Amino acid sequence: MNELKCWFVGVDWASENHRVRIADGCGKRLGERDFAHGGAGLAEMAAWLTSVTGAEPSAIYIAIEIPHGPIVETLLERGFNVYSINPKQLDRFRDRFSPAGANDDSRDAEVLSDALRTDMRAFRRLALAEPLVVELREWSRMTDDLNGERNRLCNRLREQLWRYFPAMLELEQDLGAEWFLDLWELVPTPDKAMRIRDTSIARILKSRRIRRLTAAEVSAVLRKPPVTVAPGTIEAASAHIRVLTERLRVVNRQLKDAHRQLDRLCGLLAEPTESEPGQANEQRDAAILASLPGNGRIVLATLLAEGWEALRRRDYHALRTLCGTAPAPSVPERAASSRDGSPVIRGSGTLSTTGHALPCSTIRAAAPSTPLCASAVTATHAPSARSAIGCSMSPARCFATAPNLTPHWKAKKMLAKG
């Protein structure tokens, strides 16, 4: 790359105004301006970059901290080369210009443009995701938020039942289950439980297909001696639970819809598209990942949504880092290992919950293919769990970056035997 024919731009992202600085290949400043956040402001910024440099967008390299959002999408759509950097790394580059570590918009824009010019290898190049991947990512995150909201509501429901009707807690661990909410609406108080008929309870169990309990068993639990509470407690707790049940039913419906959307989007990603002629008989990443043990709806959607870029780059180490399964590099001899040689989780990442559900061989098997297009990868029954996928690439290319997963205690034993 001829640096004299390239221009480097630093963008200090903010919620209202963005400070933009342009420098040439020698680091000389060509211009610096603030642009308002919005459609007009971002369009004006893109036009200003091309007018000041007099170059095509493909010759302009832009550095920014945030790796997503409207400003990144605007620049990528117009053909600019956009790179992101971790804020901690940017803080280290800032020491070049001020030992005191002073932080302001103009200096950050200068640090970003200069660091991209001299140390581009420290940045990560950004690319637009497929529309399906963007939609899948949003539904995956909404599902996670809905699960968190449901857990919070269930905890509040448990506290209210504990106040005056603890017997109901013996019937179900998941207090947000629809049949449990129906049962509480039928039997909201211990006094009502003494007069309810078994046929009414059996009707709820049958409609919700609950076979592990009988009406007689439920009735016996509900009619246990109640706790003694102060006057007004039952009425107050019942009013609170009534509000919680309405909110839980809404969250349950939204979760069901979110799960349907995840299944639909994952299914679309697994199908070959018309833009890929000759690929109809080859498997895509979504299909391969779905066939691996431990990959259910949530794990599959999270892998494709949050790890699509690492999968596209065949970056095995990035996947392990996102999943939180990468051991500390500074002390490899102390990295804990499981019996099958898979490192235990040492930290948390974007896919940390996925890493807990997936064995290391599953993540490794996903690395050779890409979620964006069909690839010549087919699932095979290999004798080793570490090579559960056959690939048209050479094994050296697929797993060149894969670390040695032999546990340290096993290696020492092998060395002791000579």
Image (tube, rainbow, N blue to C red):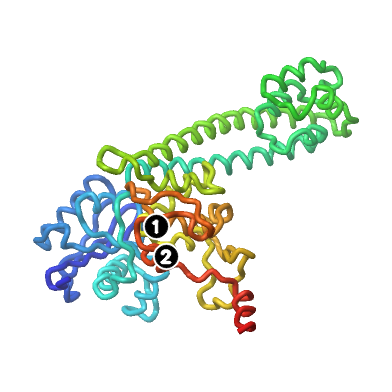
Q: Is residue 19 left or right of residue 263?
A: left
Q: Image quarter for residue 242?
A: top right
**SS class, disc 1:** loop
Q: Is residue 124 left or right of residue 43?
A: right
Q: Position of residue 221 (x, y in %)?
A: 85, 29
Between 291 and 26, the one nearer to me in the picture:
291
**SS class, disc 2:** loop
- Farthest residue in the right direction? 225
The amino acid on which the numbered mark 1 sits, given as a three-letter code, is Pro
Check contact, mark 1 vs mark 2: CB within 8 A: yes
Which disc number belongs to residue 368? 1
Between 25 and 160, the one nearer to me in the picture:
25
**Residue on which disc 2 sits:** 399
**Can residue 149 be seen?**
yes
Q: Position of residue 232 (x, y in %)?
A: 80, 29
> In the picture, which quadrant includes the N terminus?
bottom left
Q: Image quarter for residue 312?
A: bottom left
Question: Image height check: is 218 above or below 83?
Answer: above
Residue beneath the point at 62% across and 74% down: 410
